[in-house]
Image: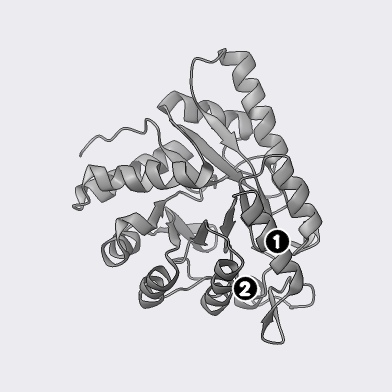
Amino acid sequence: MCKISLKGVIDMHVHSNPDIRHRAYDDFELMEAAIRVGARAIVIKTHQGTTMDRAYLCNRHNQLLHHGDNNFTMFGSITLNRQVGGINPAAVESSLKLGAKVVWLPTQSARNHIMQTKQEPLHCVDVIKDGKIIPELKEVFHLIKDFDAVLGTAHLSPEECFRVVEAARDSGVKKIVITHPEWWLVGMSLDDQIRIVKDYDVFLEHCFAQPVGGGKYQSNLPMNLEAIQACGYKNVIVATDGGQVENPNWEIAYEQYMTYLLEHGIPEEQIYYMTHTIQEGLLGINN
């Protein structure tokens, strides 16, 4: 087995405690794991709202405890579920002013998520009504543009992704990530992934594994390899969506993912691009 280094890697999608669903690491434990392997940054995500305040505390704790002997940075985000009022420009503005780097559209509140999981769609958060992008979302796009933040499509359907990406580009949003398109709940075909990259030059975030029910997960790695080969490494982000107790700890999952790609013919320089270079640009990191 090839040995690959995690030095300088950046994961744009990791879950940690505190969370309604118990996670493998809390924020400080995740930070320490990242420092141990030499990672450069992680974006922490919650379905319950915001994490930029938690990221601030991690960075302050790192400074006080490690006295600047590493360059790791934790970054925060906001997810536009019901807990923050859905597509709420005021919540987005305050989160961005407090340092959030990623704005995720609805996950568990998305109509697509609710319909796919066979729940009653009484309280879903819509991004499109009467065939049009809702006005509040256009306000959110302008905020993302003004703060040079990242838009994540979260749990939208493929059709919604195309509509939202087109509207976001029209509003001047430069940094757009299609969130785990391989997950069955999102269900974006490889042809659609190729098309959305070709038409809008977005990034596809391909993650380590996906839930298949009953607390079980299946590997996404073969599908992700196929997507890299079909869509091109310059438009694919290697991420874990890690933190589940059922999966390997974050750093183990990331190493397994990178090793798989290397052993299946993806050159090291391309893996570096998908684990370092793209994320540095999205987060505005200058190493």
- Residue located at (60% from left, 21% from top): 62
- Which quadrant of the structure image shows residue 120? bottom right
Label 1: few (<14), some (14–19) or many (≥20) C-alpha neighbours in 10 Å? many
Q: Quadrant of the C terminus?
A: top left
Q: How is the image coloured?
A: one colour
- Mark 2: amino acid: Thr
Q: Which residue is mark 1?
A: 140
Q: Tell me where residue 114 appears, x and y as whole percent.
A: 67, 73
Dot 1 and dot 2 residues touching (CB under 8 Å): no
Q: Tell me where residue 104 appears, x and y as whole percent.
A: 63, 57
SS at mark 2 in the image:
loop
Residue 104 seen? yes
Q: Residue furthest top?
A: 67
Q: Residue furthest bottom?
A: 130
- Residue located at (37% from left, 71% from top): 198
Q: Which residue is mark 2?
A: 117
**Does residue 105 lie above or below 33 as drawn?**
below
Residue 249 seen? no
For this view, does 60 lie left or right of residue 256? right
Q: Tell me where residue 167 appears, x and y as whole percent.
A: 60, 72
- CA–CA distance in space, label 1 to label 2: 27 Å
- Residue located at (74% from left, 53% from top): 92
Give the mark nearest the N terminus, 1 or 2.
2
- Which of the pair 167/15 is nearer the observer? 167
- Which of the pair 57/32 is nearer the observer? 57
- Mark 1: amino acid: Val
Label 2: few (<14), some (14–19) or many (≥20) C-alpha neighbours in 10 Å? few
